[in-house]
Amino acid sequence: MASFPSSWPCGVVLALLCSLFLLGLASSNVYIVYMGERHTDEPNLLEDSHHQILSDILGSKESAKESILYSYKHGFSGFAAVLSQSQAKLIADDFFVAYADVPEVVHVVPNRILNLHTTRSWDFLQVKPQIVDGILSEGHSGLGTIIGVMDTGIWPESESFKDDGMGKFPSRWKGICQEGNRFNRSHCNRKIIGARWYIKGYEAEFGKLSPSDGIEFLSPRDAVGHGTHTSSTASGAEVKNANFRGLAQGIARGGAPSSWLAIYKVCWATGGCSSADLLAAFDDAIFDGVDIISASLGSPPPLSTYVDDALAIGSFHAVARGISVVCSAGNTGPYPQTVINTAPWVMTVAASTIDPDFPAVITLGNNQTVVGQSFYTGRGLNKFHPIVYGADIAATNIDGTSAGSCDLETLNATLARGKVILCFQSRWQRSAAIASKSVLEINGAGVIFAQFPTKDVSCPWSFPCVQVDFEAGTSLLTYMAASRKPVVKFSFSKTVIGQQLAPEIAYFSSRGPSSLAPSVLKPDIAAPGVDILASWSPASSYKLLNSPQTKASPFNSKLDSGTSMACPHISGIVALLKGIHPKWSPAAIKSALVTTASMKDEYGQHTVAEGAPHKQADPFDYGGGHVDPNKALDPG
């Protein structure tokens, strides 16, 4: 391996390894000036140097203070500021001028907007917290570790975040409980030991966010639900009798229930996460003293070089300080070269299935039945309704393909009223949720959505919708063609355990190889990410399709799917490993997980990857394989 002079800042090495200067996305209002490793342990001196650079460009210290959004001064050096393209270029050009003398400015990165990507999953993984004399034993529950979650915030009142039995946070902890809209210091406890929120970069691009519209909270409080879900999956306390509208009933808990949580809200309900805000969260998390960072977010291809990627930069400095960083692989599978978050120093997690099934029976007018999957447990079932194919009731001037997939505003309202609509997934319309919304808006009675075979249930829970495969959908068409008055009725969905072959790699899970660095194998590992039950925010707009508001409970939950759900499973397992082996480095932990991962399902057969067609999974689907937490404890 090539060596570099020890006097070079870490950031310069990173820049050389990754690429030369590239100033993309010039339309951004915010630029990140990355200056590599800190050259002093005095944060105030670093901040003064950042102001001085800006003063030289903008003409005065007052202008510099007005322009700067964040001064990165704990884990690394740099700043984010509102700049014009020409001002950013002036700072960037100094990189070339002073290069031979090791410049202060390593790189200038335009701000980018990133996107967000249980009762059974931990039992499926055979992770059982060890209890001695009624108390969770040290290490086996993540005791002594701090998980930092970078997401949409947290709903602190959830039972998942109660602090019964939690010890006082460690003296090394330097974090804060940052107050804001409907969030004060009392919302932190011995479970949630820190909470911060970041919005300067986002507002510099899109304007001020107002909490008065009820869509968002200017605080660590979660208006989306995503951050609450990932936090409770990684580290939630035990909640008995948890369920989602009667489905997936059981005891919900996180993987490392004795670990502490530190919340970094970087993503917003109105859409997206600013990379300037994300980098500020990394800087603070390093200073605060977290052991693990869990980030279920990222940008789709084309991938930025590592030195242009705020997540890669922030995680690079975190890992250098002994902090494991776990990221989602993305949800644009099953196509190759779609995996994201491909930096070699992070753990990139693919999504796999677990064994619960949510079958719903469709009974035809001739008493034959078709079995699909559904989350619907509401009213209006066990009653026959006429059924019609969407393509046969296309609205005026709408082609049959669009109507056949029940895209928005493609169906004739008069012909659809009171009927169950059969819809087939198309290249352009792949969502059962969109089909359901389309049918609801014209007073249809329900939806049968035929699509590629997958165990991920994408039907909404708030409207009668059953998801079937293409074969079942075609058999329904055959029945409809042979009957003068075809009718169907739905049964209630239920939960069945152990009848699904698992784990399989989820259809949506992004696949390797990395489009940026194919020689770096990505993803690294797979973990449960399909139909995962965990806590959710009662303020979330996930109550889809104008359904009646349900009364919020202390454990407001949701079944959700994505590599976003797989990522915190690995984060929780890392906390377990760190609790038992506190001296293991991020590389040792990653090695233990990847080298002990399983390439076979629960019956000893080779793991299958959902796709077109399904196939035997390979390292570009799941990296080292499906996580085996118990083997990783003692990898040999």
Image (cartoon, helix red, strand yellow):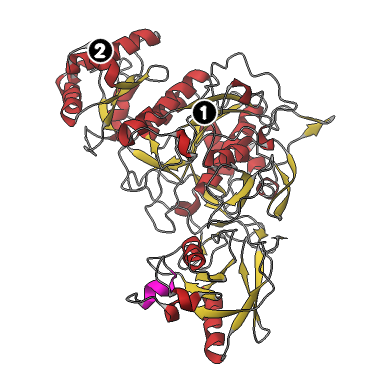
Q: Position of residue 22 (x, y in %)?
A: 21, 35
Residue 592 occupies which quadrant of the picture?
Answer: top right
Q: Secondary structure at mark 1?
A: loop
For the residue pair 304 and 486, the one nearer the viewer reads as 486
Image spot of residue 99 (x, y percent)? 19, 21
Q: Measure the C-alpha gap from mark 1 to mark 2.
A: 29 Å
Badge 1 crowding class, 10 Å Cα cut-off, few under 14, some 14 to 19, many 20 or more, is few
**Image point 56% across, 40% down: which residue?**
230
Q: Is residue 509 above or below residue 399?
A: above
| Number of residues whose C-alpha sits closer than 10 Å to that of mark 2, classed few (under 14), some (14–19) or many (20 or more) | few
If the image is split into quadrants, where does the N terminus sit? top left
As drawn, is 374 to the left or to the right of 61?
Answer: right
Q: Amino acid at mark 1?
A: Asn
Up-down relation of residue 259 to residue 423 (above or below): above
Q: Which region of the structure is painted magenta?
A: 400-406
Q: Main secondary structure of the magenta part?
A: helix
Query: x%, y% of residue 10?
Result: 34, 22
Q: Is residue 123 above or below residue 502?
A: above
- Residue 205 seen from this side: yes
Given the image, on which type of amino acid does mark 2 rest? Glu
Determine if residue 636 is in view.
Answer: no
Q: Which residue is mark 2?
A: 62
Q: Residue at x 36, y 15 (%)?
A: 38
